[in-house]
Image (cartoon, rainbow, N blue to C red):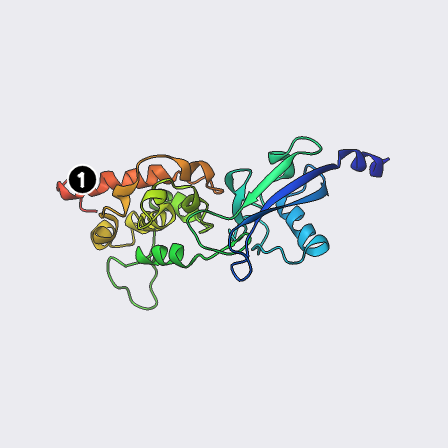
Amino acid sequence: MKDDRKKDLRMNITLDIQRFDPERDTEPRRQAYEVDVQPTDRVLDALMHIARHVDGTLAFRKSCAHGVCGSDAMRISGKERLACKTLIRDVAKKDGDVISIDPLNHMTVQKDLMVDQSVFLSKFRAVEPFLKPRKPLPFSSEFYQSPEDRAIIDEATKCINCGACYSACPVLDENPDFLGPAALVAAVRFVFDSRDEGLAARLDIVDQQNAVWSCDNHFECTKVCPREIKITKLINLTKRTIKKYKEGETDA
């Protein structure tokens, strides 16, 4: 009886995947794969089935498969998502439904759903995402932080560098030099860290036209963030803090 119920729950869907191998192809093409799945299967499960049993040439990234590493970010049914956190029932409702899958935007395709993150990560490094202590401490000492101070930066620490926000950002369509949402979230994490030198040490990085001032509040980054980080809110908070700092209203 249990096996019959499981069989009844299964559905046939089609994954319509963008394929592109720069060593062989002159332009991207679409390829459709029919897959037998359960509604509670993940899109990653369907991709793994294809790669293991149908077409071993299909290329995509995955690592932890638990929404922590961010490796399998891609555009699923037109929206940036993690394949390991997206259930079939989130994007398909009945037999015959088609799920489109594409690589992230604003990054060069290496093969199929794999993208080159070099530029994305170089922008992340450009904000100097590491602690710059307010004062040196003896080797054996620790930097203490109150729960209240930790709460201020807690949201920014959730970023997993999946690149979903970078792909969804419409500003990058017109301005590829924009640092992007993920890099600015990394900057926020230290600008408001009570143990860090704060804004004063990072002003030259964030107070630039291609940094916080390029953000036009489209909120697309916030909508697609798999960790539900309020990215646009954090960027706007940084803008307000910069203005107050320049006006002498804060010593951030």
Q: Vertical placement of 13 versus 183: above or below? A: above
Relative to 222, 177 lies left or right: left
Q: Position of residue 122 (x, y in %)?
A: 36, 58
In this rendering, position of residue 49 left or right of residue 75: right
Instruction: Look at the picture and state if 166 lies above or below 131.
Output: above
Secondary structure under the numbered disc 1 in the rendered image: helix
Check the image and report above or below for 219 versus 201: above
Mark 1 Cα shell of 10 Å, populated few (<14), some (14-19), many (≥20): some
Image quarter of the N terminus: top right
Horizontal side, residue 74 vs residue 141: left or right = right
Residue at the spot 81% in from the left edge and 34% down from the top edge: 5
Percent across and percent down for residue 28 are 53, 50
Label 1 sits on what residue type? Answer: Lys
Percent x, y for residue 125?
Answer: 34, 58
Q: In this figure, which residue is indicated by the disc labeled 1?
A: 244
Q: Determine the image quadrant of residue 82.
A: top right
